[in-house]
Image (cartoon, rainbow, N blue to C red):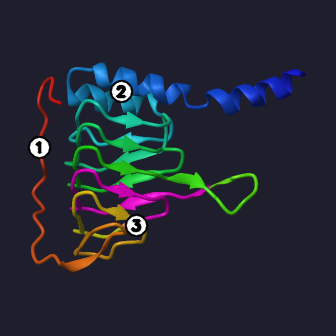
Amino acid sequence: MDFKNFKQSFKEKFYLVPGVLGSLILNILPSSSLRVRFINMFFSNSKVHQSVTIHRGIKILMMRNLYVGKGSTINSQCFLDTRNKISIGDNVMIGHAAKIYTLGHDYECKNFSSKGGDVNISNNVIIFSDVSIMPKIKVGYGAVVMSSSVVTKDISDLSVVGGNPAKFIKRRLKVHEKPFDYRVMFGL
């Protein structure tokens, strides 16, 4: 095996190692502000506003492509697949154990090739716990995604959705634009 093939083989088998190590380091840091600084310093092509709250116990697949606006909160046990870009707007609340995917596989393809795209979450969105958001999704301004929903289609502004797959329930009447602040030392 020549060096080029070895390098490609190594890359295919171990491309997730930096993300695993990054998540381990991220989760031992004692405060949200240190976690935000760590992401901004070591994640390539990423920008997280200093007012963001990131709780411990999250998993980030790769150390890149994460954008989070001011006043947003990412709760514990969340999974962020940053193989493509994840953009989270201002004042977004993401409940615990939510999962955001940017890449999957084409089950129709004999090679099971990858397919997916960026996920964009607008401002003032509430995503409750255990929600799964699939690749290439846009969540509109002020939308609410109810617990345990699976989002497979774009969500329009001010929509409340829920279920598997997530379906429109009603329109949201009022949006609270005050920033969230859930930063606590050693918080889970």
Please give the name of the residue rendered at 32% of the width and 76% of the height, measured from the top-left corner: 156
Q: Position of residue 127 (x, y in %)?
A: 24, 57
Disc 2 or 3, which lies upstream in sequence? 2
Q: Position of residue 32 (x, y in %)?
A: 22, 30
Question: Which type of secondary structure does the marked residue at label 3 adopt?
Answer: strand
Question: Which type of secondary structure does the marked residue at label 1 adopt?
Answer: loop
Mark 3 burial class by Cα count in 10 Å: few <14, some 14-19, many 20+: many
Quadrant housing the C terminus: top left
Taking the magenta stretch, the answer to whether it contains residue 124 is: yes
Taking the magenta stretch, the answer to whether it contains residue 183 is: no
Say which residue label 2 marks. 38
What amino acid is at disc 2?
A: Phe
Gap in Å between the C-alphas at discs 2 and 1? 19 Å
Which of discs 3 and 1 lies nearer the camera? The answer is: 3
Say which residue label 1 marks. 181
Q: Nearer the viewer, residue 119 or 130?
A: 130
Look at the image and give the residue range highlighted in magenta. 115-138
Q: Residue 138 carries which label?
A: 3
Q: Which of 101 and 43 is in front in this view?
A: 101
Mark 2 burial class by Cα count in 10 Å: few <14, some 14-19, many 20+: some
Gap in Å between the C-alphas at discs 2 and 3? 27 Å
- Quadrant in the picture for residue 28: top left
Disc 2 or 1, which lies upstream in sequence? 2
What amino acid is at disc 3?
A: Lys
186 w.r.t. 53: above or below? above
Please give the name of the residue rendered at 30% of the width and 55% of the height, measured from the top-left corner: 131
Disc 3 or 1, which lies upstream in sequence? 3
Q: Nearer the viewer, residue 19 or 99?
A: 99
Q: Where is residue 152 in the image (x, y as percent from the top left)?
A: 43, 67
What amino acid is at disc 1?
A: Asp
Gap in Å between the C-alphas at discs 3 and 1? 24 Å
| Apparent side of residue 105 relative to residue 10 in the rendered image (left or right) | left
